[in-house]
Amino acid sequence: MNTLLLEFSVVALGVLLLLVDAFNDRTNKNYISYFGALGLAGVLALSFLPQINPLADGPTAAFISIDPGSTFFVRFLLIATIIVVLMTPSFVPVLERYVPAERKGGGVAEFAILPIFSCAGLMWMVRSVDFIMIFVALELATITLYILVTYLRQNQSSLEAGTKYLILGALSTGFLVYGISWIFGVTGTTNLALLPQAIASLPSNALLPLLFGIALIFVALSFKIAAFPFQFWVPDVYQGAPTPVTAYLSVASKAAGFVVLIRLVLVLLQVPVLAPKIMAVIVLLTALTLIFGNFSALPQTNLKRLLGYSSIAHAGYLLMGVASIGSLMAIPAIGFYFAGYLAMTLLAFLVLLVVAENTGGDEISRFNGLSKRSPLLAGAMLLSMASLAGIPFTAGFIGKLLIFYVAIKEGHFGLVVLGCVTVASGFYYYFKVVRAMYWQQPTESTAIPVSLTVKLLIALLGAGILALGIYPAPVLAALALR
Amino acid sequence: MSPLLLLILLPLFASLFIAVGANARRAALGAAFLNLILSIFLFARYDLHAGGWQFVSEWHVVPRLGINLILGADGLTLSMLLLSTLVTFSALWVAPKIEKQEGLYYIALLFISAGVIGAFSSLDVLFLYSFHELALIPTFLLIGIWGSGDRQAAAWKATIYLGTGSFVLLIGLLALYISMPADVRTFDLRQMTDLAANGHWNTSSPVIYLLLLIGFGTLVSLFPFHSWAPPAYASAPAPAAMLHAGVLKKFGLYGLIRIALTLFPPAVHEFFNPLLLILIIGNIGYIGYVTVAQKRLDWTIGYSSVMHMGYIFLGLAAYNLLGLNGAAILMFAHGLSVAAAFALCGEIRQRTGTLDYAELGGLAKSVPVLGLLFGFVAMASVGLPGFANFAGEILVFFGATAALPSTGYLMMITIIIGVWGVVISAIYMLRAYRNIFWGPIAARWESLTDISPTALYSVVLLLIPLMIAGFYPQFILKMVATLIPQ
């Protein structure tokens, strides 16, 4: 019964908030965000109780795995959702502008509640060890995201982004189901744990259809994690979607995709016939993702779009960790990278949200002279960019250090050399934002107001970046899994 | 509390105070002064008889990977720390009145200072690397906001070069770490040295050595990875150029001495010796002539600081005690003299608004004290006896000559070019001196005000140790003589 308690609590929280909103007349809907965040924090606290995470047994054991790794990512998803939900109050003016409502405050509450449902789906997904489960959980998360991406329905770019996301998302889901059916057809199982045995007993002429199925699933997952070959939707959708949703897509959705990918790769590498082929494919995808993400980011002038390419670039570094999965340190490295990625990416989107609201756009030029208009926002963005670029004493540095460490250890020298080049290009495009904030003159000199919630979030995320960068031991200890 | 940690934290605390609204100049100068006193105290307290690492303290960070914050100092470290705090204090003192964003200006300078102090006093290789990187963003901001000339291009170039160079270095350090036997992997420099010395660890990989040479070499502006340095120094505000050329650049050499020279066996050094010598010829010969061709004082000093790195590298390439001692003295001496040169360069620029030789001339008539100081600095830079630069260069040449039997013709050619380089540097420094301070004076320069007492004292503060070490090289030599195991 306990197995999916956390996920059920999150769904219950979402339903409860919807009801509260329906029966409450207040036009200021910010309390929904605060209650939502509080409720999610409660679930997060619950996840630390020992009896909540029993080792799975009984009828659900074949579908759901309660292991320390998935628990780490469940907490990760909860934290990401809390922060995204707390971004909603700062986003209200945009919602009021683009979401037609009969009365003031309409549509705000749902915008804060929908990520909670998506979070439940993603939490379920990282626990799943059966293709059918993975598919169902993925759909729960993704359908909610379709709504969220198109949420600003009188804003053309949000609609365009939503349509792209819907069509390509549906296509990738098609790939996933098609791939699953090929694998099921060949092996007769959808359970990841039973897959290695089933594959081992296959006749050699069944390998080709099996590989075809696996390739289809890789393509579908690359959509979720924003990696080559299904990365092209990222810049457009990131740019058009409401900023909190973009933040959610780039952190939570990507993390859940990576967990499934890692589970699948770990299983497939147990099969000696497949292992070298799978590894070669992953190395190739890593290289192409790194190249595409980093080099396309160089000429960008829109920060939201730049962060989209940066999200692809970081998927590349994370894939480098997946390619080095043979090392004991690889999964802790990926987990740590994600922890840092959460803090630095959400901080960047948070500052972007506030600055865009006050200057009227997402272009990097809107950040001109930000250090004079708001030293706090500029300092936060500086910290975030430093961490994304991988400067020491930030979370991003330790993350890259661990990833490159396992990559060298596993002998991926080609990827390491490529990584050096892409890190150098990262310095350029992240520092472009720093240049705008500190070198350029502001067009206006009025101070940008920063609400208390935003200040607290900045303090929290900034402290997280520095703490992970200066004293990473506690998080690494929590991650030392296998 | 560890005194070395205090040295790192004081500038950071001062930055914090400035960020929340304290008087920027006062807080920065206060921290820098305390640091100077503390480092002089540590320098004097170092127990020469015991030798080795002293003032050691250790904090665990990632014990599983053998990453710990370990601070400690030996004679070479303390000389470098003394250099860092001297230049920091002088640079902050000489800084002119800042019109825009004064707080950020001092915070950036303090971060660079904290970074180099941390880098010099870390016994953990990863922290040694990380602390150095603290300077990256402040440099970008200092040149980009308060720089002069084509400051944006210069800032970009320096940032991309230094960022990439240090990433190559990081890969080299990681590869070095992974090449250790799995059960004893550590980033602790002391244990690494022991392991390499005992033969438990085979460090003969030329690839790793090359990565370290390129990584550290870029930071030191080793030919051909030098082209970021002159434009960055020319554009940077004087205090930033002082800290960067004077102290930060010495970090690359320090790292090479600590890691590459100490850990790798002689065979690897012999293998790379020809390559290194060719690069040194590039640094001294080629860059020397490039320096002569410069038409502005800031570019002359920028290129000359690249050129002089060649002599320090020659000391390392000699791979004997004499050469290394010479290199150590030269690091100290060059740090002080180039910082003084950039300080005076900034003073001249403030008064005239230009550093172009064609526009200047005869300034000694209107600013005689500034001229006198510049004369001192030019002589020091040329390597006139009486200044520590001379002591360093002569030891480097002795070391290189002593290495002749084992290195052959290429070393001989390098020494000849090196000696010729001394003449070249005399040519461009004396020419700069003549062009700026002698000859007929233009009417518009006649009413310049002479150097302010603040600037005078801050340059004299740099010249005094330079002359002490010049007349009494034992001052530095006794600190560094024992440290390098042969």
Image: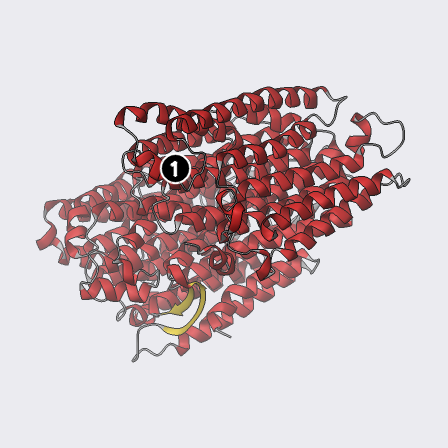
Q: Quadrant of residue B14?
A: bottom right
Residue B181 in view, yes or no: yes
Residue name at image x 56 percent, y 31 percent: A308
Res. B64 image quadrant: bottom left
Q: Quadrant of the C terminus of chain A?
A: bottom left
Chain ID for label 1? A
Amino acid carrying label 1: it is Leu
Residue A450 visible in rendering: no
> Residue B372 placed where, x, y %?
46, 55
Question: Height in image: A14 above or below B372?
Answer: above
Q: Is residue A202 above or below residue B445?
A: above
Residue occupying image coordinates x 68% and y 53%: A41
The spot of residue A318 in percent (x, y) is 45, 40
Is B259 left or right of B433, judged from the image as shown?
left
Q: Residue at x 74, y 29 (%)?
A: A360
Q: Position of residue B153 (x, y in %)?
A: 50, 33
Q: Front-most of B344 and A210?
A: A210
- Above or below for A401 versus B486: above
- Along the viewing direction, whichever of A366 and A318 lies nearer the viewer: A318
Q: Which sits in the foreground, B256 or B88?
A: B256
Q: Secondary structure at mark 1?
A: helix
Residue bearing mark 1: A195
Q: Residues within 10 Å of mark 1 (few under 14, many from 20)?
A: many
